[in-house]
Amino acid sequence: MHDVAALTAELTDMAAADHRSAVHANSDEPAEQLARRRLTARHGDRLNEIMDEYGWPTAELVGEEAARAAWLIAQHADRQLDVQRRALRLMRQAVSAGSAGPRELAFLCDRTLVNEGREQVYGTQIAGVKDGAPVPWPCEDPERMDERRAEVGIEPFDEYVAQFSLA
């Protein structure tokens, strides 16, 4: 039988390591950027193994914190599109079954689309800052973006990007 308690601890430990290394994601130091990339790649590889064994690690299986950790690991597996696509597929099934949240799914959907060079759906991914204001990656049907965001429990775009403002 699988050791769910160990899996829960492992996922939360991976998320904690991700948070600690996040400050290096945009570092000017190549060694720090490389360490961050290696960490997220290791985590992506491990998440793939977890999905082999358990499917999507839902809150019912591992608890809310560890389930969110699994989502974070998938979200940051930017150089492993196969892992992101698989996580997206399994998470979609979990959302349909009522075992995962549509909000996190929307973020993973957008992140995967952006990494594929496609337009995002919910406007969750920010490309950069222009004139002090966050600018999203291109979004399909932008006039309906806030409507789609509301459907999955994400605040309106203007409220969301206010968090990133440099004011």
Image: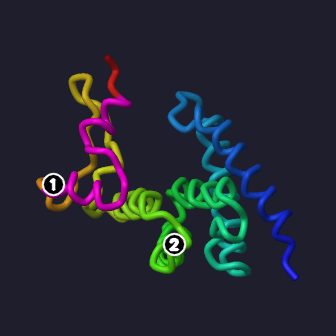
Q: Residues within 10 Å of mark 1 (few under 14, many from 20)?
A: some
Image location (x, y in percent) of residue 157: 26, 43
Q: Relative to 27, is 105 above or below?
A: below
Is residue 120 among the parts visible in the rendering?
A: no
Residue 160 in picture, x, y percent from top left: 33, 39
Judged from the image, the secondary structure of the residue bearing numbered disc 1 is: helix
Left or right relative to 125: residue 70? right
Is the image coloured rainbow, by chain, by secondary structure, or in one colour? rainbow
Tag 1–tag 2 contact (CB < 8 Å): no
Instruction: Tell me where residue 121 sits by quadrant.
Output: bottom left
**Which type of secondary structure does the marked residue at label 2 adopt?**
helix
| Residue at the image point whose x is 35% and y is 58% from the top | 114
- Amino acid at dot 2: Met
Q: Which residue is mark 1?
A: 142
Residue nearer the viewer, 75 or 6: 6
Q: Nearer the viewer, residue 56 or 18?
A: 56
Q: Amino acid at mark 1?
A: Pro
Numbered disc total: 2
Q: Is residue 85 above or below residue 102?
A: below
Residue sitting at 11 percent across and 54 percent down?
143
The residue identified by callout 2 is 91
Res. 124 in view: yes
Q: CA distance from mark 1 to mark 2?
A: 25 Å
Q: Position of residue 123 (x, y in %)?
A: 28, 51
User: What predominant SS class does the magenta segment belong to?
Assistant: helix
Instruction: Name the residue furthest top.
Output: 167
Which region shows up in magenta? 144-164
